[in-house]
Amino acid sequence: MADSDLAESALRLCQKRGAEQAEALLIRHQEKAVSVFNQKVQLSGVNETTRLIVRVFRDHRGAVIQGNVASEEMLEALVNQGLGILPHTSPDKYLGGAESSGVGTNDPLEVFDERLAQLQMNRVEEIALAAEQKIKEHDQRTENLITTNLQVQTQAVTLRTSAGFSGSYQHTLATLVANAALDQVAQRNLLSTAVTVTRSLDGLDLNKTAERSVQELTRMVGTRPAPAGEFPVLFAPASARTIAAMLFQMCSGPATLFAEALIIGKLNAAVCSSHLTLVDDATRKNGIGSAPFDHEGVKPARKVVIEKGVLKDYLLNSYYGRSLQRGSTGNAVATGDARFGVRYSNGYIEAGDSDPDDIVADLKRGFLVTRFLSPSIPLSLNFSYAAEGFWIEDGKVAYPVRAAAIAAPLREVLEGVVAVGSDLDPDAAIASPTLLVNKMNISSLM
Amino acid sequence: MMADKFSRRHFLQAGLAAGTGFALWELYRLGISNKLDRNAASLQAFKEIGLDQDHLRKLLDIALAEGGEYADVFLETSLGSYLGFNGEQFQNSGLESVSGAAIRVSARGGTSFRAVTDLSWKSLTQAAREAGAAARSDVRLTATSLKPLQTPNLYPAASPALYESIDEKQKLLNRVVESAHKAYEHVRVAVAFYRDTLRFLTVATSDGVFAYDTQPLLKITISVAAADPNTGKKGTCYFNSGGHYGLEYFQRHPPEQLGQRAIEIVRNQMEGVAAPSGQLPVVLGPAYSGVLMHEAVGHGLEADFNVKGYSAYSGRIGELVASPLCTVYDDGRRENLNGSINFDDEGVPSSRTLLIDRGRLTGYLHSRETAAQMKAALTGNGRRQSFAYPPLPRMTNTYLEKGDTPSEEIIRSVKFGIYARTFAGGAVNIATGDFTFIPTEAFLIEKGRVTAPLGNVILLGNGPEIMNRVVMVGDDLEISDLLWDCGKNGQMVPVTVGTPTIKVETMTVGGNNG
């Protein structure tokens, strides 16, 4: 059965069985993955999966059922299961799908590349092998210590809603991960990871990935511990984007349920440094997070979420939009929760006007963080990370630091951003220019 | 809840065309499982949709038709139910069913892999042919006869929670949330989330293994946010509990404990003073601190990193890599624990693997692939998130063996340091061995006594170095009942950790107070 027919059948069946509102989202996913080590293909795999997510509403109650479906009989079982759950949930006046107005767009936003989708497995293997070769050419010392992984994904997304939305689109995504190692440098192995994510075959720049992989490796030779104490901390774009992601999470609909006890408060209130402007742009052509419609069928938009430190908007889906007396911002993502989740599309902190080299030059002493070594902790009110980077002395990069703990209350970090670099990567799904935080406590691994 | 007009046969036929998920559901609902033990029910379920022992053997032959040294077929159906409660409303409720198969062929040091959600014979034979064609080898092998694998059942739940009534599950959530509110007046938000899954597996391998299993998993999570209007202090906590159990778990572990424990953590955070930073003695409490074994030891001993020579532990078998007080195991055979498995996702029985013996490195954790590459014995650690991913060497339940020092004596030995008790997670750099883990609950130790709770703390160290600085090991080994999800190469698998109280001579402590 064609995807659109299956989604349509699901919708009709939901209505026939008594759902007042319903949505059927079908995601057909194909992934070709190759892993190469020492010029040898270690793993060559193809996985093809289908997921149907059905959301049903009746009497202001909602439920979600997910599964693999390939026949009408299975659909019937799925829908009956979903409606059977409804009486066990609580009514909530905000539950329901997106309103019919303002849904969808026909602009495909250039998220699909036919050449990438049609890539044969032998060609995927060749590219992964070539990527490994490029790293070796950049630095012979990495020979026998390189792994490259290339994943090429194609997704077909189909959505039908009882509000009348009907749409489908395809998108492609290639992810190249290059790990290179240097053996026993100063009694310690070094390992770098360079990742390239792109929507198109042309975006797979092997040279650039190799160069970054080797740069990240060689710059960490000769590490020393950083001094302990309170110092300014500079976050390079690769680490600063975590701060952008954190801000989006705090400004999203689900976080408003915790808002009173967390950081972000009311609209038009100052929530962070006035140097920070946070934007989510789902309309970006070729964007990694772009899509012609979100999982509720709402069209993409560009939103200024924080403007010069002041909260201007939340990231919302239709549930949270209604509960806050605002509309959806087109950021719905299907989850097992009938309210659905919320996610940024192409999110970034706007570029400032300081050259990052000038920010470094103005620092007497400080820590430049290039990579976080620890995960983010959900709901935490603290900003505590282990980080890799460089010690800055008299306005210059003095030496690499392999691991240091940086800690401060989250609010102090967000309010303490005193400079924003001009070095924003416009292509990343989540991005930030260099950020300077006035002070954090540093304690280095000895 | 089910459509009345479907007969069981009708339903199973539908499943054949479309994946087994709801067919299995129906199988259980109709009480067929009552006549079978749980694992046999898994066997029966795939058999009902035409995937019996003979057909799996045929698939293996198709996969190896163009040569190959090894092949396996992995069938999976995972069913799950979940619901959430915020103290007022039951929301976030639903069901999920995922079915699929993966076929793998190894040849010439490489592996080809095909995964599909369509379990029809046509789809599976095509996947087998494609995997075989991609592997291509001069080695001609015929799959040997399949023999059922016999293993003890490590998760003898009375009845899988999936089939219990929603009302029962809602009562549990109510008790969790109510207990949190009762325990602390300044709780602003308390949300509990319940999830159970039942994973039906069948593995058939070209060397004759035919293994089938049903893995129940149960998890309740509580998220709490509190704010004291008098002091302006705020605290948050995310905590969970469960394992490979049915709902009988809550008879021995009342859900109120979960709410009360979350509040204890939140209050300690709110009352916490600024933590010192620098190189300090650190005492790690029992159970949850086992995350040290996971990050500082376990990941570095997963054999895929060692085949490549990346790990800080590569080529060091037989060397002293820890204090002689340290003996570390990965043990997938402990009943009901989050990381326990009757056999791994490659049909290899799980085992208790000695990783470090009184400080000396004794072995790595293997998948079939790495064991062959390193010519090592299988350890039963080839695990995958689901059929859609290839298996990798992964930990199960990793712990430090107990010593003989009473924990009070360990704390008494510290003049000024940190006592860390509960953790939110961690990470490791495999190559350098540098790791970090983040306590959600830590205290100062002053003059041999645990005193003030600490606010913001992060611990940092190098695996082999820290393990060499373990100077005291307690006699109070506990395995954590927190459900840890371990991530690697984009795949999550359930694990847990354990340790007795231990003292690390010095460790890098990061805090807000320089």
Image (spheres, rainbow, N blue to C red):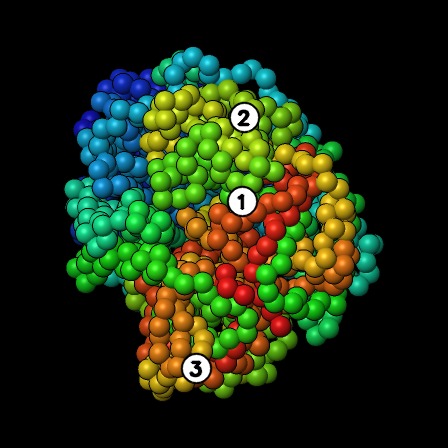
> For the residue carrying disc 3, how many other residues have a C-alpha within 10 Å: few (<14), some (14-19), or many (20+)?
few
Residue B98 in the image: state x and y as whole percent.
39, 41
Q: Is residue B37 visible?
A: no
Identify the residue position indicated by label 2 in the image. A303
Q: Amino acid at mark 3?
A: Lys
Please, which chain is the residue tagged with disc 2 on?
A
Please, which chain is the residue tagged with disc 3 on?
B
Residue at image x 77%, y 47%? A357
Q: Nearer the viewer, residue B18 or B52?
A: B18
Instruction: Specify whether disc 1 shares its chain with disc 2.
Output: yes
Instruction: Specify whether disc 3 shares its chain with disc 2.
Output: no
Residue A347 in the image: state x and y as whole percent.
57, 34
Please, which chain is the residue tagged with disc 1 on?
A
> For the residue carrying disc 2, how many other residues have a C-alpha within 10 Å: few (<14), some (14-19), or many (20+)?
some
Measured in 3D between alpha carbons, the distance from the residue under mark 3 to the one under mark 1, in whole angstroms, is 36 Å
Left or right: B462, with B309 as reference point: left
For marks 1 and 2 on the same chain, the one whose residue lies earlier in the sequence: 2
Q: Is residue A20 visible?
A: yes
Q: Are marks 1 and 2 in contact (CB under 8 Å)?
A: no
Quarter of the image where the N terminus of chain B is located = top left
Residue A7 in the image: state x and y as whole percent.
41, 22
Residue B387 versus residue B507 in the image, above or below = above
Identify the residue position indicated by label 1 in the image. A415
Measured in 3D between alpha carbons, the distance from the residue under mark 1 to the one under mark 2, in whole angstroms, is 22 Å
> For the residue carrying disc 1, how many other residues have a C-alpha within 10 Å: few (<14), some (14-19), or many (20+)?
some
Residue at image x 81%, y 58%? A139
Quarter of the image where the C terminus of chain B is located = bottom right
Q: Nearer the viewer, residue B258 or A335?
A: B258
Measured in 3D between alpha carbons, the distance from the residue under mark 3 to the one under mark 2, in whole angstroms, is 54 Å
